Image (spheres, coloured by chain):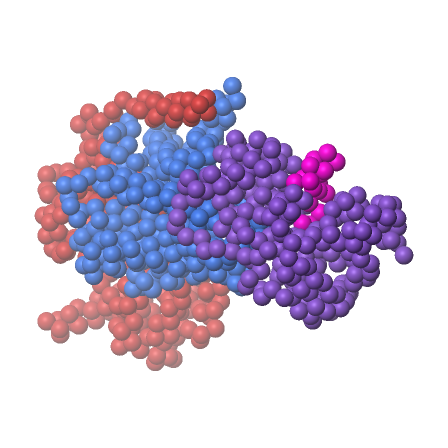
Amino acid sequence: MKKLIVSLSTLAVIALALVFFPGCSNDQNSSALPKICILQTANHPALDKTVQGIKTSLTNKYSQQGITIVTESAQSNPTLAKQIAEKFKRQNPSIVVGVGTMPTQTLQATCPNIPLVFASVTDPKGAGLVKEPKNPKNNITGVSNTLPLNLQTKILVLLLKKIAPVNTSFALGFPYDPKEPNSLSLIRLLTPLAKQEGITLKPQAVSSTAEVPQAAAKLSKLGLQAHFVSNDSTILSSLINFTQTSTVPVISSDTDTINSATLAFGPSQTKVGQTAGELIISILNGKKASELDILYPTLEDLEIVANEKDLKRFKITLSNAELAEIKKEAIRLTETKVDSKS
Amino acid sequence: MLILQNISITLNKNTKLERPVLQNLSLTVTPGEFVVIIGPNGAGKSTLLNIITGSLKPDSGLVSLAKAKRKKNIAIVTQDPRVGTMEQLTIYENMALALKRGAKRGFKPIYNKKRKELFHRKLALLNMGLEKRITDLVANLSGGERQALSLIMACLTKTKILLLDEITAALDPKTATQIMHLADHIIRTEKLACLMITHNMNHALKYGDRTLLLKNGHFAESFTRATKTNITPATLAAKFED
Amino acid sequence: MITSSELILSLVLGLIYGLVALGIYLSFRIIDFPDLTCDGSFVLGAASASIVLQADLHPLLALTIAFISGALAGAMTASLNRLLKIPALLSGILVASMLYSVNLEVMGGLPNIPLIDSTTIFNLHPSIPILLILSIFTFVIICLLGYLLNTDLGLALRSLGQNQQLAKHVGINITLLTILGLALSNGLISLGGALLSQYQNFADIGSGIGTLISGLAAVMLGEQLLPFRSVWIKLSSCIIGAVLYRFVIGLALHNEILHLETYHLNLIVGLMMITIFIINRRTRRC
């Protein structure tokens, strides 16, 4: 009996502690400042840069004091994401922001009445976020983080021709983490496109950062001309390690990672974040999220950069003028293709 | 009835420890007979029990009971009361577990009136007051009480053969006497065939219809109830040596 | 700042993870098998349920299939251990890591399946609150488990974790019962995964992270707070422990009061758990 009383009273004390937790006062958004709550999948360089981009464009517009920005990381755990989303909901934010697919899905399910802006979601339709990229309807809009695939293919083939001028066909290593929705859809879409240009994609699954050097060593034995690394958290987290182990140049599709790769092209993740920031500003200015089309990086956002130091390792020289030429050529090839299609 | 015919077994085959344990050993235990086995350490007493229960397979020789039937027909009580009972279950639950020895365990609730009356009756035989503590955890019982409970549990279902493996070894002398007395009482009233291993020479002389000395892999000597009256514990122990 | 909706969320997640805690209780406590399959079987439940839901089949069928597939995974771990004599910890690790590939295969190679357009157990009858559905569900599971553990079969399961030698003596088939125990345990964990994905409206390959830890924490928290012998109280304490654990995380998320960052979360949760254990010990001693 005594045991029962102790148990019940302990439970009661804990319950009371929960209800009267210090700071239980409602700190609802009493001030008129707009409040933005950002939830990112995890802390890793590419996502951090996107978040940084969002913050930069917002503080440029409103100044540090003019806007409240809360950032949380779900630590790759969907259940934790749910609890954070619920906390956001109570804070009455003007807009919630999902950086990555999983947090965006969670925010959409948890706070359907708060405008939702996403960034770094490769396939918003496939993730069930929207039915149509134009006029998304569900109080949601955002920025995807990938360049059109045929453009990516053209750039890859142009870069490969510089890397291995004598070759007519190429083999391209593609390390990826099967956990990443982005990487899987990319393999599916890119393989046939690359084939048309004479590039054979050699995917290699890597399920943790610890396996990255092994994957590099294994891929290097396949007689490749280069590696291609897309927007994949696991690989990007240990990109420098991968590049150092690799015996062929590494091309990354994230220009912010150029210090850890040989070559990089694409929209910078910071820029993706900034574009998302601009969508947020439009909504704060009275636009409805559902009226704003989902944005994809444009040809103008394309940057191609090289890591001089690493290029030297492979005895390749690529001047800035040559890179600019590749960019122009890739855009021209892509546009003629679009024209010929239509 | 249990018949062992020409049993031989060698343990740790093909190792440095290879050692023939039992050689051409034969034994017949008739229904209702109480046989006591004594012998020096390493003589093969435990090996013999393991062969009877079926957990060891002899290299040659025959055991009369088919292996499938043994689970149902052989019950064993060992020297460690912690092995013979489940500490974190109640007396009732322990007995319910033993009640289903060799039977199918299905989705019938363990608690029912019939079982409760049966367990109560069996525990009352012990004169230890355990029937009043039927919902107590076995962890709260003394060593003697637990050994008594394991005896009751072993005989709860219709067994044909009861194996007792040094059941008093871990008990103080007074409790040991009490438990042996109890075991003898159960064996006699239930008319069980019993095979008991003991190192206690007094018990070896006092109990059992027959006492066998196991030495060098076979039974070296046999004493009937009549011949045992002329032997003292000291002379019996001396027979271990030669 | 903890609000009623956050309390409800903790309750909902607590009830879902309560199933995980029950599964862990079955393996770690009842049959005393340190089973590490759970991180894989949790996702397996989410994956198999979501493909059933995507095919527009009934949510109850999805839950049944999730349970069965989880049970198969558990049976696999038990068989590796009992039949092939692979150590228990390694068997669990092997199956969990193989399940990673299996789960991706089940999900058609996709790491994330949206269920936003599917009929789930929670929106089948939108008028019934989610909390009520889960409470009924949990109640039924506890009743079934409590009944089972008090049958001859359940008693045999309980004996496995205590004294395998005696269990053998009274004629219990240890291999068969270990398989049964782990199948039941992982079936429940898999159900938890299936419910979580339906609640969140997506199945994610990463959702298995921390399943074992939150399940074990829930079991032990429950045992600390309600140290009673009755099977019924032990089962209920798993659920109470799971809810409390979610409360603790919910509280720890309000770390902005202490001017801490999100990445301090695990540290705060750990410290709060330690505090609960200390307070509980103290009050019991005096």
**Closest to the observer: A307 or C31?**
C31
What color was chain C assigned in the picture? blue
* Residue B239 shows in the view: yes
* Residue C21 shows in the view: no
Which residue lies most toward the front here? B226
Q: Which chain is red?
A: A
Q: Is residue B130 above or below residue B235?
A: above
Horizontally, is C127 left or right of B168 in the view?
Answer: left
Q: Which chain is purple?
A: B
Which residue lies most toward the right here? B242
Q: Which residues are magenta?
A: B164-182
**Closest to the observer: A127 or B4?**
B4
**Residue drawn at x 58%, y 48% as measured from the top left:** B155
- State the image coordinates of residue B131 (x, y, percent, origin top left): 53, 34
- State the image coordinates of residue A265 (x, y, percent, origin top left): 31, 61
**Closest to the observer: C172 or B212?**
B212
- State the image coordinates of residue C130 (x, y, percent, origin top left): 22, 41
Horizontally, is B188 left or right of B68 in the view?
Answer: right
